[in-house]
């Protein structure tokens, strides 16, 4: 399959956002667009293999969220733009900015983990911009003050202590990814995850921890899922320790627009751990709607 790959940067609110098109040349009429949102600490590049597989049906757009991957963390001239926060609703508005800048009126969304929380806000802010949505490893959770406080303190330490030499230690990538996976990934893929984590801007990485794992999020996220008007597929990993499948089941129960699929023998990255089953499930959902 011949792929057409193009990457560049686009200015949204004064911040340079990296984006990449993955397309398969076709003589048929123009394909619909699927936009991929990545999760915390990562970048759009872990979506590459999924986008390549779906490029026969979609023109696939990958981009890196502000402060992650190859996207800048701050405005070019901060004095000329409003102060940017790390509230997820701001990231939802930035998604609209990306679509507007690329003249994309209506798209399919595929969002993973924290990207799913951003997509949930986007679906209710701009439902006219989304044809169908796929949420991969997303869900709702309950507030526990002690657990959240401990998590925030631990996360700050983890984000602070990220020496670049860590990527050069043998098997460091395997250790880093162990908690996220049920099935191991090729070394090149796990190394890319570690590199992205080390590359993330501190303020963006820690700021989004505070806003995505918070008492406020436990209140507004269920409301967002319950208000969806766009048909949505929620794919959960059977052994996901980050966002357990039960959290996805609880989210799906809030709205009959949400269809739940739990992939056996996968964890937080089902699209990479069992790509054939994941792609089959996504295609089935898209084609049946």
Image: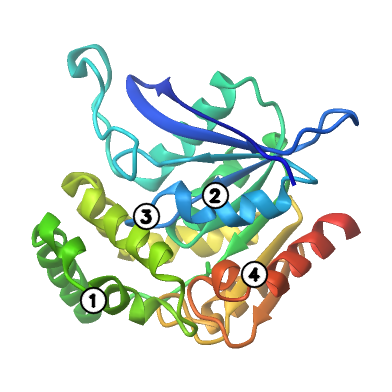
- Check disc 4 and report the residue beneath it: 275
Secondary structure at numbered mark 2: helix
Q: Nearer the viewer, mark 4 or mark 2?
A: 4
Q: Measuring from the top left, give residue 126's x and y in whole percent.
A: 62, 36
Question: SS of the residue at dot 3?
Answer: loop
> Does label 1 or label 2 sit earlier along the sequence?
2
According to the picture, the residue beneath numbered tag 3 turns out to be 42
Name the one closer to the observer, 177 or 120: 177
Task: Calculate the distance from the C-alpha at mark 4 to the C-alpha at mark 3.
Answer: 19 Å
Label 4 vs label 3, nearer the camera: 4
Residue 24, image x and y in percent?
74, 38
Q: Give the labeled residue for mark 1.
A: 145
Q: Residue at x 70, y 26 (%)?
A: 105
Residue that carries the numbered disc 2 in the rendered image? 119
Please report contact status of discs 1 and 2: CB closer than 8 Å, yes or no.
no
Q: CA distance from mark 4 to mark 2?
A: 22 Å
Alpha carbons under labels 1 and 3: distance apart: 26 Å
Q: Nearer the viewer, residue 213 or 105?
A: 105
């Amino acid at each position: 399959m011949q792929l057409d790959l193009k990457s560049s940067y686009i200015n949204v609110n004064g911040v340079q956002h990296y984006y990449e098109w993955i397309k398969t040349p076709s003589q048929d009429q123009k394909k619909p667009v699927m936009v991929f949102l990545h999760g915390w600490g990562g970048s759009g590049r872990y979506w590459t293999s999924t986008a390549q597989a779906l490029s026969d049906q979609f023109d696939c757009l990958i981009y890196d969220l502000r402060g992650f991957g190859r996207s800048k963390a701050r405005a070019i001239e901060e004095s000329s733009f409003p102060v940017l926060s790390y509230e997820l609703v701001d990231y939802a508005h930035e998604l609209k900015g990306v679509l507007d800048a690329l003249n994309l009126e209506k798209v399919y969304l595929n969002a993973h983990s924290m990207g799913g929380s951003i997509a949930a806000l986007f679906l209710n802010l701009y439902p006219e911009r989304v044809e169908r949505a796929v949420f991969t490893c997303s869900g709702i959770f309950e507030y526990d003050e002690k657990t959240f406080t401990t998590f925030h303190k631990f996360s700050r330490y983890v984000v602070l202590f990220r020496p670049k030499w860590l990527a050069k230690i043998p098997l460091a990538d395997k250790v880093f990814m162990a908690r996220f996976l049920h099935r191991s990934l090729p070394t090149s893929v796990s190394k890319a995850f570690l590199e992205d984590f080390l590359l993330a801007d501190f303020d963006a990485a820690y700021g989004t921890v505070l806003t995505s794992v918070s008492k406020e999020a436990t209140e507004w996220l269920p409301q967002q899922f319950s208000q969806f008007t766009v048909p949505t597929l929620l794919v959960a990993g059977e052994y996901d320790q980050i966002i357990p499948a039960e959290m996805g089941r609880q989210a799906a129960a809030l709205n009959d627009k949400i269809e739940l699929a739990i992939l056996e023998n996968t964890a937080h990255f089902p699209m990479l751990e069992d790509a054939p089953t994941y792609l089959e499930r996504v295609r089935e959902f898209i084609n049946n709607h």
